[in-house]
Amino acid sequence: MSDIDVQFCEILPEKIRIQPFTMVVFGGTGDLSKKKLLPTLYHLCIDQDLPEEFSIICFASSERTDEDYREFVREAIEEFSEGTVNWGCWENFREHLFYLPGNFDDEESYRRLSVRLEEITRPTDMGTREIIYYMAVAPEFLPRIIERLSLCKLCKGVFNTRLIVEKPFGRDKVSAAELNRLIGRAFDEDQIYRIDHYLGKETVQNILFFRFANSIFEPLWNRRYIDQVQITVAESIGIEGRARFYEKAGVIRDIVQNHMMQLTSLVAMEPPIGFEADSIRDEKVKVYRTIRQMDIEYIDRFTVRGQYGVGGIDVQDVPGYREEKDVSPDSKAPTFFAGKFYIDNWRWAGVPFYLRTGKRLKKRTTEISIHFRQPPLKLFSTTCEIREPNLLALRVQPDEEISLHIGVKYPGIGKQLYPVNMNFNYERDFTGDVHFPLPYERLLLDCMKGDQTLFARQDEVEAMWAVVDPIIRRWEETPAPEFPNYAAGTWGPAEAYELMQSEGRQWRVW
Ligand SMILES: NC(=O)c1ccc[n+]([C@@H]2O[C@H](COP(=O)([O-])OP(=O)(O)OC[C@H]3O[C@@H](n4cnc5c(N)ncnc54)[C@H](OP(=O)(O)O)[C@@H]3O)[C@@H](O)[C@H]2O)c1
């Protein structure tokens, strides 16, 4: 597409230049930093997205020097960057990396941080000094770090600061609200960036463009034409050494409360009045608030939980969840969720949203599928029974694509209706020098620019918890005796199939 002279419209009126900044990475030696954050920051440097003056300070507990940390970062980039690493920017990048050994509980460490910030941070064009605090730490550390930053007057005042907070944000609505209050005492809402890397994915952002820029779909986007919506976030990986987190969290806190709720709201929301952060977030919150609250009877009937047992993925034997390192042998943590949701508003009344996610499922696939109603097919009823009504599939991973399944006449003298696909694929259709930012790349740049659109707002997080809290509570009150109840490498427990079959429907499989 790049070699065709296409005129396109950019929503942002101007490109914003990133101003000098210092990023303090609390937990800059941890798993997330190694795998995602540090390789992404390096990527931004290669792409020349970073300003000349920037600094990255890692605040962590082990004793290291700046030089040790630079070596640590080099190894992380080597191991975790996607594709072959371009080292062209390394000599420049490494000079911007610093290490501050300290303890999250120790006030003295924050005083040393304050001195370091004074020394390192360079002014912007406007004379301000910008600091981004990235909380790459276990959630229990968050309150202590914020309190100490506040005590040392590092939240507001001398520096312009922003705070990036990782998921999970709380364990339920009450704790999320408490965390919001605590952070809110130190930072204003426009300084807080609650990150969900799903929102950095191209196809996820494209949902809004696709829906609202194409007049052929928007008139159909409602209960009159749509029979059901399915959202699947299927992972073929297990818990990847994160037992400590997963045993406490389980599948709903890990995936449903954040990624799946975000996908649901983007599919279901009303058109925002503009592309500003709050216009979009206002509409998303309305969706969460109109999702029907589930009572116990409904949860028992219309949600399915599962935990994987031993099985095989791509002809390789894999252990069951309870055999994973640091998992209790009688763990009750669910690794699979399926459920039917209703959004009780004018647009969606009566349309079921089926959500399904799990670990160690057959294939890694994230997809939203919009299943349209059957046409009144009297015309064809004597020759065939249509089993595949029109379906629009928005694929988020592994491929980023959109396909529309339609029925056509099968060639020949007969009168057969045949299902075919019309397909758009990001990688295939945008070639040449088109750049596909990685999710963290996009989100970090947005934070550096001060754009909060792709970050969750305080009320948004609490509203998402309010949807899933009753399910988590019910499941925790009645631990599943039947675990493990699906083999790794399948599409989940039999009850998930039954849930759909009892409604005359089927899950999508690939
Ligand atoms: N890992 C992922 O793939 C992933 C994905 C999505 C979200 N997240 C979220 O990201 C956050 C970080 O997770 P993670 O897996 O990266 O954690 P992690 O591997 O346990 O890293 C913890 C970091 O905190 C530092 N630390 C621990 N205790 C400290 C203390 N008392 N004082 C100073 N430093 C201390 C460690 O420093 P030392 O090494 O020097 O001790 C290390 O840098 C969590 O909220 C997690 O839920 C993680």
Image: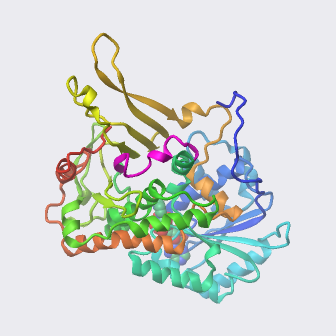
Q: Quadrant of the C terminus?
A: top left
Query: Furthest-top residue in view?
Result: 413
Q: Residue 400: horizontal and vertical position, in percent?
A: 49, 41
Picture quadrant of residue 67? bottom right
Residue at horizontal 63 percent and vertical 79 percent from the top: 188
Residue at horizontal 25 percent and vertical 34 percent from the top: 387
Q: Residue 236: horizontal and vertical position, in percent?
A: 34, 47
As for residue 16 lying within the magenta part, the answer is no
Kindly tell me whether residue 236 is visible in this rendering. Answer: no
Residue 281 or residue 171, whichever sits in front: 281
Residue at horizontal 64 percent and vertical 30 percent from the top: 1
Query: Furthest-bottom residue in view?
Result: 151
Image height of 249 relative to 212, above or below: below
Report the side of 97 relative to 144 (left or right): right
As for residue 222 lying within the magenta part, the answer is yes
Report the side of 264 relative to 413 (left or right): right
Q: Which residues are magenta?
A: 213-231
Kindly tell me whether residue 326 is visible in this rendering. Answer: yes
Image height of 186 relative to 244, above or below: below
Residue at horizontal 73 percent and vertical 61 percent from the top: 96
Q: Residue 92: horizontal and vertical position, in percent?
A: 76, 53
Q: Residue 52: horizontal and vertical position, in percent?
A: 80, 57
Residue 189 or residue 139, whichever sits in front: 189
Report the side of 152 relative to 467 (left or right): right
Picture quadrant of residue 468? bottom left
Picture quadrant of residue 55? bottom right
Report the side of 276 relative to 323 (left or right): right
